[in-house]
Image (cartoon, rainbow, N blue to C red):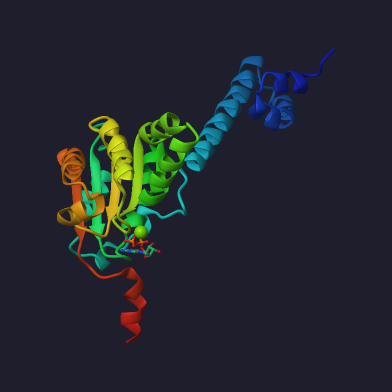
Amino acid sequence: MKNIVSYLKDFRLAGIVKTYELRLSEAGEKNLSHKEFLEIILEDERANRETNRKKRMYSIAHFPYQKYMEDFDFTFQPELKKGAILNLATGSFIPKGENIVLIGQPGTGKTHLSIALGLKALSYGYTCLFTTVWDMITTLQSSRADMTYKKKIEYYTKPDLLILDELGYRSMGETTVEDFFEVVSRRYEKKSTIITSNREFTGWDKIFIDKTLTGAIVDRLIHHCHTFIIKGESYRFKNRSKEE
Ligand code: ADP
Ligand code: MG
């Protein structure tokens, strides 16, 4: 006859496997009923599955590092509307498929804010994917060569929240603009996208080269969009100016 632990393993009840021995002695000591014991170990299984799901969601989101809203110093960017950002941190823009565009010079906290919003989104149970624009378009380009293009487009279309960091550092070629447009138009009005850029909208035709496609991309992105232009100086200069 099989023992209980091997049954639990066969049925993939890893949460119960972890706590089974402890719970058994606890049940003995506290004189728990069969029903109480069963409820406790089922709750262990549920909690373990929830923890694993969160870890999985965090790992597939591919954040380069962790940055939190609570650590963002809004007093350093007084022109940035704190209330509006904190409102977005409730995640309410995600089911509405609204977008966020963060524009500012390097060091003004765009990546920090986008990761912080992404982590909040995960905590509400939304799926999220972080990528730089450059990584996404090079991945899409090479996927054309190995016939995984459709799958890769799906990969960028599917998450509830897609964070596209660093738009505008490098300009794109014709087919890469088409790939970018493909992702944006598939997500349009269905899924939320956060874009960070060092260039204001008026300069985006220099990134996307083709004027018609630029118009089509910008139209879709800004239709339901919260735009923030962060005018302050780089946070990297913060301590430097204090020391001076
Ligand atoms: P950007 O993406 O705009 O170039 P980052 O978000 O990478 O800037 O910010 C650069 C560094 O400064 C990061 O370590 C970030 O956490 C920090 N930082 C930027 N702005 C703030 C701020 N207002 N409060 C706290 N940390 C900030
Ligand atoms: Mg950045």
Q: Is residue 7 above or below residue 91?
A: above
On the question of residue 109 being in view, the answer is yes
Residue depicted at 24% across the width and 46% down the height: 100
On the question of residue 91 being in view, the answer is no
User: In the image, is 218 to the left or to the right of 172?
Assistant: left
Q: Nearer the viewer, residue 144 or 182?
A: 144
Q: Nearer the viewer, residue 5 or 173?
A: 173
Q: Nearer the viewer, residue 164 or 175?
A: 175
Quadrant position of residue 216? top left
Q: Position of residue 32 (x, y in %)?
A: 66, 21
Q: Which residue extends farthest right?
A: 1
Instruction: Classify the position of the C terminus by image quarter.
Output: bottom left
Q: Is residue 134 above or below residue 10?
A: below
Ligand 2 located in image quadrant? bottom left
Q: Is residue 244 above or below residue 67?
A: below
Q: Position of residue 128 (x, y in %)?
A: 40, 39
